[in-house]
Structure formats: C-alpha cells, structure tokens
Image (cartoon, grey):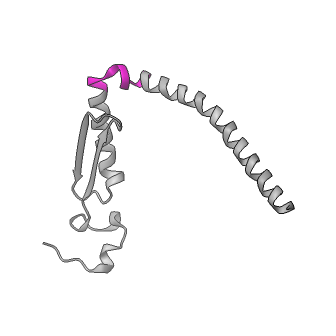
Amino acid sequence: MIRISADKIYHKCEAMRMQDRHNAFFAGFAPVRDPKIAVAVLVEHGCHGASAAGPVARAVIKTYLQKYYPELYSDKAVALRMRKRAKNTSGDESRIERRRRYRAQRRRHAADS
C-alpha cells in the first residue's frame, strides 16, 4: 500500500510518477436495447477511464459485434443507418423552430396582456 498526501492526489495524473498514477477502469455493454456483450477494462496507471480504458473497450465491443452481427454492425451498415438518421433529423429541426416561434408568440402575447 502506498500512502499519498491529498495535494498529490489532485495533481495532473499524467505528470505523476508511474508508480503514483491512478488505474483507469471502464465498463460497458452493447447494444443498448438488447445487450449481447459486456466488457470491463482495467488499465494499470492509465489515469482516466474514458481516455485510457474506454478506447480499448470500444475496440473489443466493435470487433465482437462486427464478427457476430455483420449485417447490423459492419462499417457499411452503420454508415447507412447514420445517413438515414441524418435525413430524419432535418424534419426535427423544423419542428424545433416551430416550437420556438410558438413560445415567442406566447411570450409576446403575455407581455401585451
């Protein structure tokens, strides 16, 4: 066990000596709606889970999904879904604009009353 003073804990982790650095931990699962895989990654002296262990977990999950479900998770299939999603969000933007206009009208009407 290593004893570290409180002022050392709050230093930038990357600037610390290797033996004093924090371990990085990340756990995740995919896909969200019907999980097929769960992953836990521990990187010794990695400092931050999101920047050190997260990319490792992402690569493991991506490789697994592309191997066992290529029709859903290949690069082409994902790109196609993203394009479809982008087309569908253009209608959402106009809905958001209509909502803003409506709220602005209500505020003007309330100020006039």
Question: From the viewer's perspective, is residue 57 above or below residue 42?
Answer: above
- Specify the quadrant of the image occupied by residue 70: top left
How far from the left and from the top, in percent, is residue 63?
Answer: 29, 31
Q: Is residue 85 above or below residue 106?
A: above
Front-lying residue, 64 or 34? 34
Q: Quadrant of the N terminus?
A: bottom left
Q: Residue 28: x percent and y percent?
A: 29, 45
**Residue 87 in which image quadrant:** top right
Q: Is residue 8 above or below residue 14?
A: below
Give the mark count: 0
* Furthest-top residue in this view: 71
Foreground residue among 23 and 83: 83
The C terminus: image quadrant: bottom right
Return the residue nearer the eye: 110 or 96. 110
Query: Which residue occupies 18% across, 77% down?
Result: 3
Magenta stretch holds residue 56? no
Residue 52: image x %, image y %? 32, 51
Is the magenta region chiefly helix, strand or loop? Answer: helix
Q: Is residue 88 left or right of residue 15?
A: right
Write down the region rendered in magenta: 66-76
24 up-or-down from 87: above or below? below
Q: Residue at x 49, y 23 (%)?
A: 80
Q: Residue at x 54, y 25 (%)?
A: 84
